[in-house]
Image (cartoon, rainbow, N blue to C red):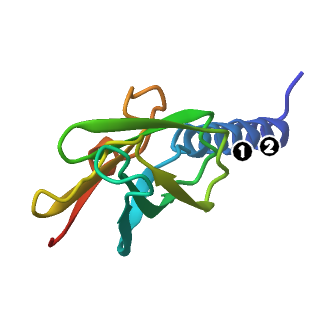
């Protein structure tokens, strides 16, 4: 038989478990593009026209409070050259820098170079903020 003291303890325990469960549900990753380093955007043409490649460095972050499982980063070099970069699981609070180059023939400057980076472009990660996954930067030519 339960006493009023045991009922009070049981109620307190249940309340604590419910509060804990509610806070667990709020834990989600938040993937963002922190920086596209426009100073790093360079074009080299080692074999002349048609061999040009554009290189860029960028940093992504998980600013959420939970780990993000593996996802994709899509990088688009103007005019329409796209590279997909797989990213393994990323812990909460982590940042990661990448340096990627377009395939040959990818001279981005016409006359300016716009590069867009989008994390989780396939929307496979349930995030706390889905509206901050893409950033574009333009470097004048």
Point 84% across, 38% down: residue: 6
**Mark 2, residues whose alpha carbon is within 10 Å: few (<14), some, or many (≥20)?**
few
How many marks the image carries: the answer is 2
User: Which of the pair 133/108 is nearer the observer?
Assistant: 108
Q: Position of residue 116 (x, y in %)?
A: 28, 51
Picture quadrant of residue 81: top left
Labels 2 and 1 touching (C-beta < 8 A): yes
Secondary structure of the residue carrying tag 1 is: helix
Q: Tell me what residue is drawn at x 46 percent, y 25 percent.
A: 124
Instruction: Examine the image and state in which quarter residue 40 appears.
Output: bottom left
Q: Where does label 1 land, which residue?
A: 12
- Residue 54's tag is none
Q: Residue furthest left?
A: 111
> Which quadrant, please, contains the C terminus?
bottom left
Q: Is residue 100 left or right of residue 136?
A: right
In this view, 92 is above or below 27: below
Position of residue 122 relative to residue 134, above or below, is above
């Amino acid at each position: 038989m339960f006493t009023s003291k045991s009922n009070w303890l049981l109620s307190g325990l249940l309340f604590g478990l419910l509060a804990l469960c509610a806070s667990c549900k709020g834990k989600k990753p938040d993937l963002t593009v922190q920086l596209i380093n426009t100073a790093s955007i360079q074009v080299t043409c080692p074999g002349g026209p048609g061999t040009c490649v554009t290189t860029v460095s960028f940093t992504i972050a998980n600013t959420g409070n939970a780990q993000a499982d593996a996802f994709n980063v899509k990088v688009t070099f103007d005019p329409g050259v796209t590279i997909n970069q797989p990213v393994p699981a990323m812990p909460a609070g982590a940042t990661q820098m990448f340096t990627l180059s377009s395939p040959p023939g990818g001279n981005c400057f016409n006359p300016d170079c716009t590069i867009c980076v989008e994390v989780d472009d396939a929307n496979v990660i349930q995030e706390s903020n889905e509206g901050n996954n893409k950033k574009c930067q333009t470097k004048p030519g």
